[in-house]
């Protein structure tokens, strides 16, 4: 990989201690990385455990790491490596989605068992349980955090939706399916006469299986990951036109997951080629590669914003 260094203009705001970068793998390991050196700073030992790690999420205050591991969810204290994880049991199928409520008081999980569960992180109790009546592949929380199922969107009929992403300002929703197609809805104000979810466009992002779609925090780009080994970056116009901006090439196998930096300038990806990569959005180049996993790296999480 290129021996590229980070430009000095971006370095002062990015001290390694303030950047939390984590990957999970089918080798059953969770690894923390120094983002800029590429060194693995810590591995969470899971001696004797066999559950595969499916999803990772970092709490808004950078205090907790949530890991969907087979049918359970483990909550680790990031600053206290010796503390045993808090464990949430209740799902009867693979946990496929984990995300924190914006204030970090709740954790939302989704599973192949067809349920979405909301957990109270303060009491460690299950707060709510929703039956989706079909396996859940992904979950996002809208800023308004409505607590009832208000809409059902099925633009592709029986083709499963693999990944969804919500714009940080709550204005737009994108969903990608197993066939590599993306569907986009504008989210209108509840008080308006327009439909709450208004279909605005659809496009073919990849010709192979799509694994993840993700809006950048500034909502200027959409990243899509695929079985075709690439990550595609789509620019988004004000009238919801998605145009291919860059193709990030370098991974040798499926790309499973991605995470943006808070300023939308960098993207982390995880791949079946056992590596994770840090990409510079402006150039489309790999600026760091993270080597250490012995099997597919299937999930990643990055938090480099204010804690």
Image: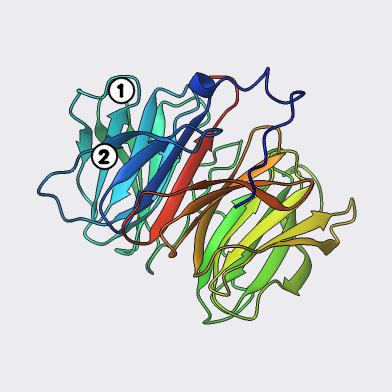
Quick one: SS at disc 1?
A: loop
- For label 1, the crowd category at 10 Å Cα-Cα, with few meaning under 14, some 14 to 19 and many 20 or more, is few
Nearer to me, 90 or 65 = 65
In this rendering, which labeled residue sits more in front, label 1 or label 2? 2
Is residue 156 shown above or below 74? below
Is residue 267 shown above or below 164? above
Task: Report x, y in % for residue 62.
Answer: 46, 24
Instruction: Work out how far the residue at label 1 is from the one at label 2, CA to CA, in angstroms.
Output: 14 Å
At 28% from the left and 20% from the top, the residue drawn is 80
Q: Which is nearer the N-term, disc 1 or disc 2?
A: 2
Q: Can residue 115 be seen in this view?
A: yes
Q: Can residue 130 be seen in this view?
A: no
Q: For residue 74, which numbered disc appears in the image?
A: 2
The type of colouring in the image is rainbow
At 58% from the left and 79% from the top, the residue drawn is 208
Task: Report x, y in % for residue 243.
Answer: 84, 63
User: Residue farthest to the front?
Assistant: 3
Task: Report x, y in % for residue 188.
Answer: 76, 49
User: Residue farthest to the left?
Assistant: 48
In which image quadrant can residue 233 be found? bottom right
In which image quadrant can residue 5 be found? top right
Q: In this view, does 70 lie to the left or right of 54?
A: left
Mark 1 highlights which residue? 122
Q: Please state the total of marks drawn on the protein image.
A: 2
Q: In this view, does 287 lie to the left or right of 93?
A: right
Residues under numbered marks 1 and 2 in contact, where contact means CB atoms less than 8 Å apart: no
């Amino acid at each position: 990989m290129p021996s590229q260094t980070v430009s000095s203009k971006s370095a002062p705001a990015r001290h390694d201690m303030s950047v939390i970068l984590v990957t999970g793998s089918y080798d059953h390991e969770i690894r923390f990385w120094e983002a800029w050196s590429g060194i693995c700073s810590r591995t969470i030992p899971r001696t004797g455990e066999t559950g595969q790690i499916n999803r990772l999420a970092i709490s808004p205050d950078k205090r907790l790491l949530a890991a969907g591991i087979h049918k359970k969810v483990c909550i680790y204290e990031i600053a206290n490596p010796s503390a045993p994880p808090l464990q949430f049991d209740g799902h009867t199928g693979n946990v496929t989605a984990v995300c924190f409520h914006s204030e970090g008081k709740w954790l939302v999980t989704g599973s192949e068992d067809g349920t979405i569960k909301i957990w109270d992180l303060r009491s460690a109790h299950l707060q709510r349980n929703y039956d989706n009546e079909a396996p859940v592949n992904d979950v996002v929380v809208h800023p308004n955090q409505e607590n009832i199922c208000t809409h059902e969107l099925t633009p592709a009929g029986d083709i499963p939706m693999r990944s969804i992403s919500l714009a940080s300002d709550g204005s737009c929703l994108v969903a990608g399916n197993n066939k590599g197609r993306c569907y986009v809805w504008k989210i209108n104000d509840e008080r308006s006469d327009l439909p709450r979810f208004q279909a605005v466009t659809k496009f073919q992002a990849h010709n192979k299986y799509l694994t993840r779609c993700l809006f950048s925090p500034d909502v200027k780009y959409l990243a899509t990951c695929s079985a075709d080994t690439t990550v595609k970056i789509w620019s988004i116009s004000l009238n919801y036109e998605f145009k291919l901006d860059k193709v990030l090439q370098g991974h040798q196998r499926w790309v499973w997951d991605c995470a943006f930096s808070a300023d939308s300038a960098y993207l982390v990806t995880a791949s079946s080629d056992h590596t994770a990569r840090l990409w510079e959005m402006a150039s489309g180049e790999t600026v760091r590669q993270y080597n250490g996993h012995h099997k597919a790296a299937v999930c990643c999480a990055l938090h480099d914003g204010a804690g």
